[in-house]
Amino acid sequence: MLRHDVVVVGAGLAGQRAALAAIEAGRDVAIVSKLHPLRSHSGAAQGGINAAVGAEDSVDTHIFDTVKGSDYLGDQDAIEFFCREAGPIVVEMEHFGTIFSRSDDGSLARRPFGGAHFPRTIYAADRTGLALLQALWERLGSERLTLYAEWDLVDLVVRDGRVHGLVAFDRTSGEFAEIAAKAVVLATGPAGRVYAKTTNAHSCTGDGIAAAYAAGAFLKDMEFVQFHPTALLESSILITEGARGEGGLLKNASGEQFMVRYAPHVKELASRDVVSRAIVTEVKEGRGFSGPFGGYVHLELMHLGRERVESRLTEICDFARRFAGIDPVTEPIPVYPAQHYMMGGIGTDIHGATNLTGLYAAGEAACVSIHGANRLGGNSLLETLVFGREAGRAAAAYAATAPAPEMHASDLEAAAAPLRAWSARTDGEDPSTLRTEMQRTMEECAGIYRDAAGMLEGIQRLRALRARFEKVRVVDRSPVYNLNLTDALETGHLLELAEVILVGAYARTESRGAHARTDFPKRDDARWMRHTLARRTPTGPALDYAPVAFTRFEPTERVY
Ligand SMILES: Cc1cc2nc3c(=O)[nH]c(=O)nc-3n(C[C@H](O)[C@H](O)[C@H](O)COP(=O)(O)OP(=O)(O)OC[C@H]3O[C@@H](n4cnc5c(N)ncnc54)[C@H](O)[C@@H]3O)c2cc1C
């Protein structure tokens, strides 16, 4: 059996930052990752990372913008900590070798992003995530840790509320393995593949969130799903908010800059929930364009000039040319909102601790909560570093004195049994069919606008799909890189999380941030200024609620 003090699951920015912190604390550390670290979704981040480093900006304004952006659901003590750590941790990444873009005077260049009072988003052209990921991977130094790459977490081993390790599946050989660990940090990233239209990579299937949920951890605020306003039509490839930060304009079919009506002060740079709803409304009310891939609006960059568009938005030019046959230097880009980010996740405190002893979480898989009901662009990359480091430190400190983990041979058998049963079946359900039906259900019943009837129908459809998943069948018997098997595993995770999203959303009878209900259009602070907590039971998620932490900002109406 393999043994380590701290096992980090996930090698994106959050997992790597956690591993670095745990190594620096003197622990023996391993990373388990289903992808090569540099293929993690963090590497797809485009627009940038927030830190109030300029003379005109301030940490206090960053705190206020984040609280307001969250529609007052973010925990203010966590947000204060987060914004204070921003400057030092981004400068540290610069010292680690991140090639950030520069202003003419050599200082870190910053661009305006939605919901921010000042240009606060530090960037490396429009490949900020890759620049950060490469620098951190080099700093971490693979010789200082054990890397189990292309290994999938299958199950956590938890007894009496304490984690003892995990069971993993080696994609390269088809073997299962037990890894005993004093502490486990889950940094498994997004779950965007719950939806059909998402900017998230195919690997973003919420595995760690589902594993924590199955092991008895509570999930927080899962009903809050961010839709990015500008995804490329048809493929849903992200067109960064940086495009609007650089001066890009949104226009409807009459050529009107419609954001003037929805957010008169900041227009295109209102927060994402506001801009996404505006686009959906324009299309629904007949003012958008229509085509074979549905309704859409235009994002115009032409007026910015070739030099600026090609140097600051290099990747965007490439994506638009390759995937839409559009040249953004001379033509408008057809865009429509797509799922982009989960505000919710595994509930943690500021140090990444969950309700299970020895289990920590960080990054997009976790919910601290700093994003509340709506995340500001540029705050997520920052979250991976600030809370990745916290989780790594806390896991290392716990592991320093924790008793030796106890793993049994039956742990591996219990984790492997369902997967073996899927492969042994001669008849049953195709995982890809179930996944497609789930994604359609979520688009139709848990989208940008929601109502009770639609969500109830969605919950019933999902329960039927979960029942069918009990008979899932894996046709491919190959031991090596059996994607049919890993697809089935991931589909099971997505189905669990889809239900948590819908059950939480149905219960929350108000509109707040990204959760917009046509039957309850107003925010209801008296009843709903509280976090949703979901725990797994055999009959589905059981909901509970927890208070929001306030320090200095009283909730007011949110206007941009
Ligand atoms: C296209 C796109 C652009 C974005 N742009 C920005 C931006 O400009 N600014 C910003 O602040 N945010 C941005 N975001 C959001 C931000 O990039 C992510 O929230 C953040 O990078 C997530 O980091 P992470 O470390 O939590 O997860 P990831 O980087 O997704 O890493 C997850 C890791 O977990 C591993 N893993 C997953 N499941 C398993 C399993 N079962 N077993 C083992 N390993 C597993 C994967 O291999 C991977 O290494 C963007 C997101 C997308 C999708």
Image (cartoon, rainbow, N blue to C red):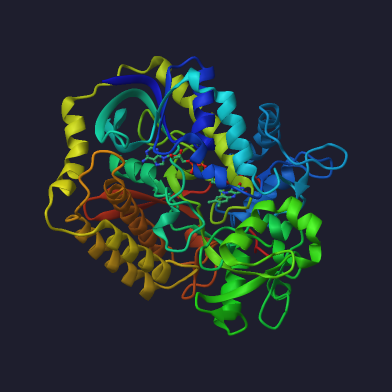
Give 12 or 558, whichever is nearer the viewer. Answer: 12
- Where residue 275 sits in the image (x, y, percent)? 63, 66
Name above or below for residue 20 compared with residue 78. above
Name above or below for residue 7 compared with residue 427. above
- Where residue 126 sits in the image (x, y, percent)? 67, 49
Among the 4 quarters of the image, the one containing residue 559: bottom right
Name above or below for residue 474 compared with residue 514. above
Picture quarter with the C terminus: bottom right
Among the 4 quarters of the image, the one containing residue 9: top left
Residue at 46 percent of width and 75 percent of height: 519
Give 75 or 158, whichever is nearer the viewer. Answer: 158
Picture quarter with the N terminus: top left
- Where residue 315 sits in the image (x, y, percent)? 65, 52
Give 49 or 429, whichever is nearer the viewer. Answer: 429
Q: How many numbered marks appear?
A: 0
Q: Is residue 126 left or right of residue 430?
A: right
Residue at 58 percent of width and 77 percent of height: 281
Q: Is residue 240 visible?
A: no
Residue at 56 percent of width and 81 percent of height: 290
Q: Is residue 497 visible?
A: yes
Residue at 68 percent of width and 73 percent of height: 262
- Where residue 310 sits in the image (x, y, percent)? 74, 55
